[in-house]
Amino acid sequence: MTFLDSAFDFAGNTIDAVGSIASNTAAKAVTLGRSTLHTVKENPGKIALVCAATIATGGAAAAFAGPIAATIGSTGLLGATASGTAISTLKGAALVKASLAALGGGSLAAGGGGMAAGATVVTVSGATLGASVSTGAAVGVSRIQK
């Protein structure tokens, strides 16, 4: 067997393996989708409540992103600004802006996402928390009802 034969065999086996993985993943995605649709069909009220809680907590987190970030920043968890000032020593608008920027990966000038990305992090975290808690509550209620 030549080197080229070995290389072609390896490439063929790799393509077969990737195809098998893709096929299995697609089958699992279809099964998950069907299961999700069945759950929604059987529990429309609970699903609506989970969605409402997710929207409410995400909206609240978006509305209060500044104060939430400032609270986190004042604890000292976010480190220092690009200029080296500890965020926990800042006050007022400077604390809010530095905290949001830190949560967003740093200031735009430093290559981070800035305050907008920080506000997005807070909003998505709030929505995720709401979805998790409300889903847990819905599952708990379902188990109690059985």
Image (spheres, grey):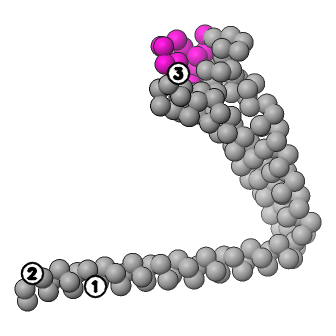
Check disc 2 and report the residue beneath it: 3
Where residue 125 appears, as percent x and y from the top left, is 69, 43
Numbered badge on residue 12: 1
The secondary structure that dominates the magenta segment is: loop
Q: Residue at x 59, y 27 (%)?
A: 101
The image position of residue 106, as x and y in percent, is 53, 28
* Residue at x-position 74% and y-position 74%: 36
Instruction: Report the front residue among 54 and 136.
Output: 54
Q: Quadrant of the C terminus?
A: bottom right
Instruction: Choose the circle earlier in sequence order: 1 or 2.
Output: 2
Local crowd at mark 2 within 10 Å, few (<14), some, or many (≥20)?
Answer: few
- Label 2 or label 3, whichever lies nearer to me, is 2
Query: Label 1, label 2: how many angstroms apart (C-alpha)?
Result: 14 Å
Q: Give above or below for 50 relative to 123.
A: below
Read off the magenta span. 76-89
Q: Is residue 55 left or right of residue 2?
A: right
Residue type, mark 1 in image:
Gly
* Quarter of the rendering occupied by the N terminus: bottom left
Q: Amino acid at mark 2?
A: Phe
Tag shown at residue 79: 3
Residue type of the residue flagged with mark 3? Gly
The relative height of residue 77 versus residue 89 in the rendered view (above or below) is below
Residue at 53% across / 28% down in the picture? 108
Give coordinates of residue 107: x percent, y percent.
Answer: 54, 26
Find the distance from the CA under tag 1 to the CA under tag 3: 51 Å
> In the image, is residue 31 above or below residue 90?
below
Residues packed near mark 1 inside 10 Å, few (<14), some (14 to 19) or many (20 plus):
few
* Up/down of 49 relative to 5, above or below: above
Residue 85 part of the magenta-drawn span: yes
Left/right placement of residue 111 relative to residue 65 reads left
Image-based side of 114 in relation to 110, left or right? right
